[in-house]
Image: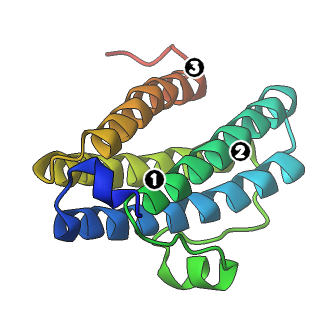
Amino acid sequence: MKTMDFLHLDASAAKGVAASLKQLLADYQIFYSNLRGLHWNIKGHGFFVLHAKFEELYDDVSEKADELAERILMLGEVPENRFSEYLRSARLKEVSGISCSDEAVKLVLESYGHLIGEERKLLAQASEAGDEGTAALMSDYLRAQEKLVWMLVASSECGCEKK
């Protein structure tokens, strides 16, 4: 017996969704590692706030990576667990040596920008496949990440620019 026997999803479409989830998982794993580095190495005027925020973010990213891996398994595929494969296939690249708050926030925003774009594509793909479970997961991620991006952008503005 297999989980897919009970999900009423087209196996071929589910395989495509799982492949996209695997790609997203690789990006999440690289992002997690990058966030750990930012958390450890941040310095300067935003240290206290960003040190705590980066820990909150990498905990969230770790949870999402686990959810992605479990969703891949539900769709009848096997998630990758080797970091060498994540490095090979991820579209996000690992970084090091970032300690400046402006540079760190910029990297986080760019990473979320990439993830949001991929999640939107996956949402459409999952919807097309009739995979409401994956679509709902992506929708949940998008809602939270859009708010986070707004907050990060707002926190990096001084508020004195003219509109």
Circle on res. 120: none
Count every numbered label the image shows and give the total: 3
Secondary structure at badge 3 equals loop
| Figure check: 163 above or below 130 | above
| Residue 24 at least partly seen | no
Task: State the CA–CA distance, disc 2 to disc 1.
Answer: 20 Å
Instruction: Give the colour scheme of this rendering.
Output: rainbow
Kindly indicate whether the residue at mark 2 contacts the one at mark 3 (C-beta within 8 angstroms).
Answer: no
Circle on res. 71: 1
As drawn, the residue found furthest toward the left would be 128
Comparing 130 with 148, the one in front is: 130
Mark 2 neighbour class, 10 Å CA radius: few under 14, some 14 to 19, many 20 or more:
many
Tell me the amino acid under the disc marked 3. Answer: Cys
Secondary structure at badge 1 equals helix
As drawn, the residue found furthest toward the front would be 1
In the image: residue 57, left or right of residue 69: right
| Residue 8 at least partly seen | yes
Which picture quadrant has residue 77?
A: bottom left
Residue 41 location (% of width, % of height): 87, 53
Q: Which residue is denoted by mark 2 in the rendering?
A: 58
Q: Which residue is denoted by mark 3 in the rendering?
A: 158
Earlier in the chain: of badge 2 and badge 1, it is 2
Tell me the amino acid under the disc marked 2. Answer: Tyr
